[in-house]
């Protein structure tokens, strides 16, 4: 069964006065917000495609959007099962293939080109394969606290504990989950904004299943796509700027291997985002947006 989050759940979300728009991606609607860009829709215009991870939504990019919008068009979708996007109630409906196909359809339906991909967590797990498999649409990559797990990687004990907790916890508090992934304290209204897309358990299937979709063996679903992506990233010739948070216990160790794997990444400044953890957009969004605009200007 497909469920849709009631609009009134988002009425009290702070600092996020963007009108949601929707794209049909099969039987589901994928929500997104947009800002910036010229009125004539110039094809050569810079387009920032900002992809969030689990279990957040486009709200995560609110601190970055104004600065990016001064430089180009900013498109921030909600992955299926997140934010204002439609979702399946049945956990079995979620797969790497489903999420990837939805994102691919979204980009193709909007016919996005000249994209600077800004991606974090699952936004990178899904976005980097799309960029490398449709390189004609993408001009630059900005991977943040993310990677492409092809099943050959070692997953930490802490990650396994997290995945088990998310899948089985009786009362999963999404707001608290996000807050625990930030370096700085969040206000009560911001924590509630992260809870907004999840009125009750019926709406939580995507949040519950994301960790379990990470391939932990080369034979797992999605592993072949991610292995191909690893190969293609090793041949990437367009600009790439790897920006990780120093205080992220989940992904910080992946930063240097990724930066040295993408051939063009070491051509960019060697920068860590200090005083930021897994959800670095929340901890240091304005600073990161300035770094990204500078990156676009110099490339």
Image (spheres, rainbow, N blue to C red):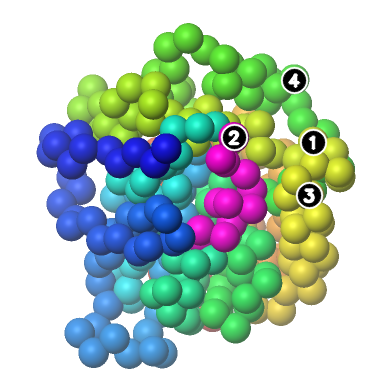
| Image: magenta residue range | 92-103
Locate the C terminus and report the quarter of the image it occupies: bottom right
Q: Looking at the image, do the residues carrying marks 2 and 1 touch, with CB atoms under 8 Å apart?
A: no
- At mark 4, the secondary structure is helix
Closer to us: mark 3 or mark 2?
2
Report the Cα–Cα distance between label 3 and label 1: 8 Å
Give the residue number, with chain letter if any, for mark 2. 92
Report the Cα–Cα distance between label 2 and label 1: 18 Å
As rendered, which of 259 and 53 lies closer to the eye? 53
Q: Residues within 10 Å of mark 4 (few under 14, many from 20)?
A: few
- At mark 1, the secondary structure is loop
Give the residue number, with chain letter if any, for mark 4. 157
Give the residue number, with chain letter if any, for mark 3. 223
Q: Image quadrant of residue 283?
A: top left
Vertical order, 50 against 5 (above or below): below
Closer to us: mark 4 or mark 2?
2
- In the image, residue 101 lies in the stretch drawn in magenta: yes
Q: Earlier in the sequence, mark 3 or mark 2?
A: 2
Residue 141 location (% of width, % of height)? 58, 67
State left or right for residue 97 relative to residue 117.
Answer: right
Q: Image quadrant of residue 203?
A: top left
State left or right for residue 100 relative to residue 279.
Answer: right
Q: Looking at the image, do the residues carrying marks 3 and 1 touch, with CB atoms under 8 Å apart?
A: no
As rendered, which of 85 and 191 lies closer to the eye? 85
Report the Cα–Cα distance between label 4 and label 2: 25 Å
Q: Earlier in the sequence, mark 4 or mark 2?
A: 2
Give the residue number, with chain letter if any, for mark 1. 216
Q: Earlier in the sequence, mark 4 or mark 3?
A: 4
Q: Earlier in the sequence, mark 1 or mark 4?
A: 4
């Amino acid at each position: 069964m497909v469920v849709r989050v009631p609009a009134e759940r988002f009425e009290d979300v702070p600092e996020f006065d963007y009108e949601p728009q929707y794209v049909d991606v099969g039987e589901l609607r994928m929500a997104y917000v947009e800002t910036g860009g010229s009125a004539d829709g110039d094809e050569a215009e810079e387009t920032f495609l900002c992809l969030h991870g689990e279990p957040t939504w486009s709200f995560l990019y609110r601190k970055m959007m104004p600065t990016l919008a001064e430089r180009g068009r900013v498109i921030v979708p909600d992955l299926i099962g997140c934010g204002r996007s439609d979702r399946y109630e049945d956990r079995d409906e979620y797969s790497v293939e489903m999420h990837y196909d939805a994102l691919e359809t979204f980009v193709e339906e909007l016919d996005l080109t000249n994209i600077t991909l800004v991606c974090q967590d699952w936004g990178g797990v899904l976005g980097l394969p799309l960029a490398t498999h449709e390189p004609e649409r993408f001009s630059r990559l900005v991977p943040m606290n993310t990677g492409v797990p092809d099943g050959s990687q070692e997953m930490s004990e802490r990650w396994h504990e997290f995945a088990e907790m998310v899948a089985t916890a009786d009362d999963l508090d999404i707001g608290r989950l996000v807050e625990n992934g930030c370096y700085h304290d969040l206000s009560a209204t911001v924590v509630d904004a992260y809870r907004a897309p999840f009125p009750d358990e019926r709406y939580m299937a995507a949040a519950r299943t994301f960790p379990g979709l990470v391939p932990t063996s080369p034979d797992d679903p999605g592993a072949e796509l991610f292995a191909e992506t690893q190969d293609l990233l090793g041949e990437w010739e367009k600009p790439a700027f790897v920006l990780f948070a120093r205080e992220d216990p989940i992904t910080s160790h992946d930063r240097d291997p990724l930066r040295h794997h993408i051939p063009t990444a070491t051509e960019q400044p060697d920068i860590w985002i200090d005083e930021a953890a897994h959800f670095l957009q929340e901890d240091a969004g304005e600073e990161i947006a300035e770094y990204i605009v500078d990156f676009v200007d110099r490339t």
